[in-house]
Image: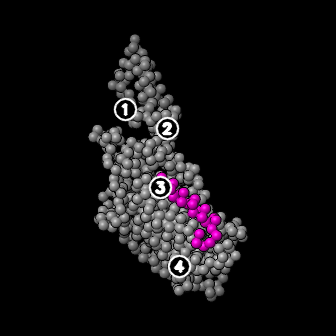
């Protein structure tokens, strides 16, 4: 009688399992079996048919649990019980991709704050150069200090961020940077002296150092190799969004008394938003596995992000082939690499030279000079302050469109072609600015429009090349134990170059004239083209672990 009932029982079991695969189960504990074996085949059928009713119900529950992957947002130590339950492969991938997009968005808000802090000074300078502000008339030296304070603070922040992130984790380090942005906004909005404004800009720079050092590392350690380039490229795109937002905010505040205060304090808006969305942030699975030895936590983070298997976890597998099955089998955390080791140890020397060289060239091409002084340049060429900021806003919109598309191109075409093509465009844009400066004194009516076109070409080319590539490559080329320190070293090199460029631009213009200064930047970009062509490795499609032994 039992044998006769077997087909019906089997059909009922199959229907039950199919239903479990389609529905969402309640939120609860992790499916402990992960991708464990399910009853099936002749042996599984025989075992199932030989069970009592209670045993069958227990097998059904265990089978449902084995196809369910519950992962929740976490602090560094452990997951809570909240989070989505994935009941099929499609749900697993879709939910993981959604969580990865949310994490990327939340992390990139730090870069939006960076963009606001960087771009706000462009519109604020038009106010601060007037003598009727609360700060009084600013000297050339005072303006240079205010502008250079942010990159100087970013240099200090980058030197702190790498070791700090290795010790406390990527997630908490990014949130600490947000607190610094809020403090900087408070100092700048209440500034009554040039010194207080300079200090506020310095604190904002500290936050920028944390953001630029860690955001792409954080995203890169959470993303799969196939989409790592696209996702990490959203970080520099966030800078563009922040710059554009600061420009648009400057428009209605141009004729408002004290409007420069609100413009400079805009970095607090995305920082506050990220703090509100911090539940979207999980800790980097690679940091958990390699720094804390927490393989179980790393595995849960991976599943939360839609990644069941990862090459780096296989290197920590236990003797029985399982990953993270026992705390006793956890590897000891890896020690952090010092900045000195990046120079003295051969293993790190080449990736350090690539990261530092790319990041320095990013600034030496003059990007922040164009960002900081674009409204002022156009104003001197005959545009009104409102028109100058308006044109820069339109250029920023075009740059945003290009930047939003470049991520997919980086993963499809490769890092090298994108970088070299964009650098050639930078030279063209700078040459147009030099030509406009040369023709303006002669009274050519169309000379200012050459400057507008030159800024457009320069900014678009930068968005397609030197904006994302240094960030992406810096997060890829280092071995795991040196990744955050190496990326921080690259950020430090970038900020050193930024301090040099922004601090010398006005003296260079006074000494060489605008035409000579732009021509000097053209020469730097030409050198950058050949340096990048000779040194930049292609990392498209490679996992981070495949680059452990060198690029």
Closer to the chain start, of discs 3 and 4, is 3
- Horizontal side, residue 38 vs residue 71: left or right: left
Tag shown at residue 505: 4
Q: Position of residue 246 (x, y in %)?
A: 62, 65
The answer, for residue 422, to whether it is visible in the render is no
Q: How many marks?
A: 4
Q: Quadrant of the N terminus?
A: top left
Q: Residue furthest bottom?
A: 442
Residue behind mark 3: 173
**3 and 1 marks in contact (CB < 8 Å):** no
Give the extent of the magenta segment: 172-196
Q: Which of 193 and 369 is in front in this view?
A: 193
Closer to the chain start, of discs 4 and 1, is 1
Element class at badge 4? helix
**2 and 1 marks in contact (CB < 8 Å):** no
Residue behind mark 1: 37
**4 and 1 marks in contact (CB < 8 Å):** no
Element class at badge 2? loop
From the image, state whether disc 4 or disc 1 is nearer to you: 4
CA separation, marks 2 and 4?
54 Å
Q: Residue at x 44, y 36 (%)?
A: 30
Residue behind mark 2: 81
Q: Nearer the viewer, residue 429 or 172?
A: 172
CA separation, marks 2 and 1?
24 Å
**3 and 2 marks in contact (CB < 8 Å):** no
Q: Which of 261 and 220 is in front in this view?
A: 261
């Amino acid at each position: 009688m039992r044998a006769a009932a077997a087909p019906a029982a089997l059909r009922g079991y199959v229907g039950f399992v199919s239903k479990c695969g389609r529905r969402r189960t309640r939120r609860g504990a992790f499916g402990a079996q992960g991708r464990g074996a399910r009853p099936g085949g002749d042996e599984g059928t025989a075992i199932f048919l030989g069970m009592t009713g209670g045993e069958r119900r227990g097998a059904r529950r265990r089978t449902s649990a084995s196809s369910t992957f519950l992962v929740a947002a976490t602090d560094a130590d452990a997951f809570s019980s909240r989070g989505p339950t994935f009941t099929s492969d499609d749900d697993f991938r879709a939910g993981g991709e959604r969580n990865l997009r949310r994490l990327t968005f939340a992390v990139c808000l730090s870069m939006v704050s960076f963009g606001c802090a960087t771009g706000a000074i462009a519109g604020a300078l038009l106010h601060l150069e007037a003598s009727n502000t609360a700060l009084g008339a600013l000297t050339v030296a005072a303006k240079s200090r205010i502008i250079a304070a942010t990159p100087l603070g970013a240099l200090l922040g980058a030197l702190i961020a790498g070791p700090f992130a290795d010790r406390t984790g990527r997630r908490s380090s990014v949130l600490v940077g947000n607190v610094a942005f809020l403090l900087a906004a408070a100092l700048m909005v209440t500034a009554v002296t040039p010194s207080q404004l300079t200090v506020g800009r310095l604190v904002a720079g500290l936050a920028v150092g944390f953001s630029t050092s860690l955001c792409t590392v954080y995203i890169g350690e959470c993303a799969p190799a196939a989409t790592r380039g696209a996702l990490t490229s959203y970080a520099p795109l966030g800078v563009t969004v922040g710059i554009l937002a600061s420009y648009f905010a400057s428009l209605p505040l141009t004729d408002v008394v004290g409007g420069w205060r609100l413009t400079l304090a805009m970095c607090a808006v995305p920082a506050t938003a990220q703090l509100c969305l911090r539940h979207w942030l999980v800790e980097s699975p690679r940091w958990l596995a390699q720094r804390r030895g927490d393989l179980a936590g790393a595995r849960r983070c991976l599943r939360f992000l839609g990644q069941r298997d990862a090459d780096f976890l296989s290197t920590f597998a236990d003797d029985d082939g399982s990953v993270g099955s026992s705390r006793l089998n956890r590897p000891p955390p890896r020690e952090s690499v010092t900045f000195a080791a990046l120079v003295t140890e051969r293993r790190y020397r080449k990736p350090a030279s690539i990261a530092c060289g790319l990041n320095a060239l990013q600034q030496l091409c003059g990007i922040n000079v164009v960002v900081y002084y674009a409204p002022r340049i156009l104003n001197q060429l005959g545009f009104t302050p409102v028109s100058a900021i308006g044109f820069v806003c339109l250029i920023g919109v075009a740059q945003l469109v290009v930047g939003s598309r470049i991520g997919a191109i980086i993963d499809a075409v490769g890092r090298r072609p994108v970088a070299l093509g964009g650098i050639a465009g930078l030279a063209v844009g700078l040459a147009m600015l030099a030509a406009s400066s040369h023709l303006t004194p002669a009274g050519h009516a169309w000379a200012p429009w050459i400057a507008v076109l030159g800024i457009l070409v320069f900014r678009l080319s930068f968005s397609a090349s030197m904006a994302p590539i240094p960030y992406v490559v810096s997060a890829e080329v280092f071995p795991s134990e040196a990744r955050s320190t190496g990326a921080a070293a690259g950020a430090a090199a970038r900020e050193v170059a930024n301090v040099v460029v922004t601090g010398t631009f006005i003296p260079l213009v006074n000494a060489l004239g605008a035409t000579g200064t732009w021509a000097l930047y053209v020469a730097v970009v030409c050198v950058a083209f050949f340096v990048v062509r000779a040194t930049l490795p292609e990392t498209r499609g490679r996992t981070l672990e495949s680059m452990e032994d060198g690029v």
